[in-house]
Each structure stands twice: as structure tokens, then as C-alpha cells.
Image (cartoon, rainbow, N blue to C red):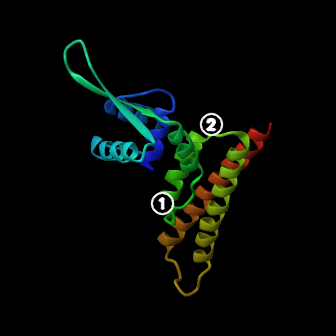
Amino acid sequence: MIELLILFVLSSSPLTMYGVLKSILAKFSPYTKPSFGTIKPALLRLEKQGIIISSKSISDGGKVSVMYAITPDGLKELKNKILEVDTENPVQFLSNARIQLVCAGFLDMESQQELFKKLERRALLIKSDAESKISDTVISPTYFHRLVLDNTICEYNNFINLLEGLKRGSNS
């Protein structure tokens, strides 16, 4: 997910590594808070793949700054990463999906609809799994387990309703 965040913030303008972190935190801090230790290796990976490029410049004070910019291949990769719905972990799914939805404005209308449908399918599967656990007589959920499952179902209902609204809104 860090690559998606980096590509998204670089799609607006070239930034230094500090600028990348600051921009990610400004836009995505309710969902994730990466560190320099996460960003630096990701920048190196993306540059090695030709998805971003870097250039060095010297400031008036003599300090070397490295600016990172997205390439045309990077813009294609950004679209692919926004449309990727591949996590099996339900906790990671919601966090990643929220980030993808924040980035959905980068996509054309058709791709937005594709993203909304993919996310909805996955959310429905996770919600269905939680619903089946409530009625599962083999595991017999305890009171607290049942409350957590109910909360999970509500959370996914809210997310699915959000997706429904986004699908309708982007069709208008």
C-alpha cells in the first residue's frame, strides 16, 4: 500500500522524501502513518522499477536535495494499484479500501465503477462470513464474540452503503 500512497502524492507534483511523507500524512493520516523507514525503501524500489525518477539539486545553503517525480509508467502503475483488491485479511481490507477510495478521483468514471464493484464484492464476502459465525452452532460465539461480530457486520454494512452512494454519485 505504501507504493500506492507514494505514487498518488507524486502524481500531483515532484517532492522530496520529506515532502512525500508530509503529503501522505496530510492526506491519509486517519488510515495510515508511515515512517521514513517505510518510505525510503519504497522510493528506491519504485525508482529501480522505473516508476519514479529522482534528481538531485543543491540548495542555496549547499545542501543536496533529492526530488522524486512520477513517470508515465508510474501513472499507469498508480491506476493499477488503485484498482487492486487483493488482501485476504479483513482488517487490512477496510484500511486499504478507504485509501483506494480517497485515490479514486484519479481514475476515469468507468474505472471508478470497476473499483466500487470490486470493493463491494469483497466487503459482501467478509460481511457474509461474519454473519455465518453468529449462527454457527459449532463455535457457539460467546456474548463478547457476538457483540464484536455484530459490530463487524454493522461496519461492513456502512462501508457497503458508502460504496452504493459512490456508485450512484459517480454515475450522475
Q: Position of residue 113 (x, y in %)?
A: 72, 48
Instruction: Please give left or right for residue 8 compared with residue 136 in the image.
Output: left
**In the drawing, does residue 8 fall left or right of residue 134?**
left
Residue 129 seen: yes
Q: Neighbour class for label 1 at 10 Å: few (<14), some, many (≥20)?
A: few
For residue 30, say whether it is visible. Answer: no
- Name the residue that disc number 2 marks: 105
- Residue 126 lies, with reference to residue 16, above or below; the image says below
Q: Position of residue 121 (x, y in %)?
A: 67, 61
Quadrant of residue 40 within the rendered picture: top left
Q: Disc 2 on helix, strand or loop?
A: helix
Nearest the viewer among 124 and 76 is 76
Q: Which residue is mark 1?
A: 91
Amino acid at the residue labelled 2: Gly
Give percent across and percent down for residue 72: 53, 37
Residue shown at 58% from the left, 86% from the top: 137
The residue furthest bottom is: 138
Q: Residues within 10 Å of mark 2 (few under 14, many from 20)?
A: few
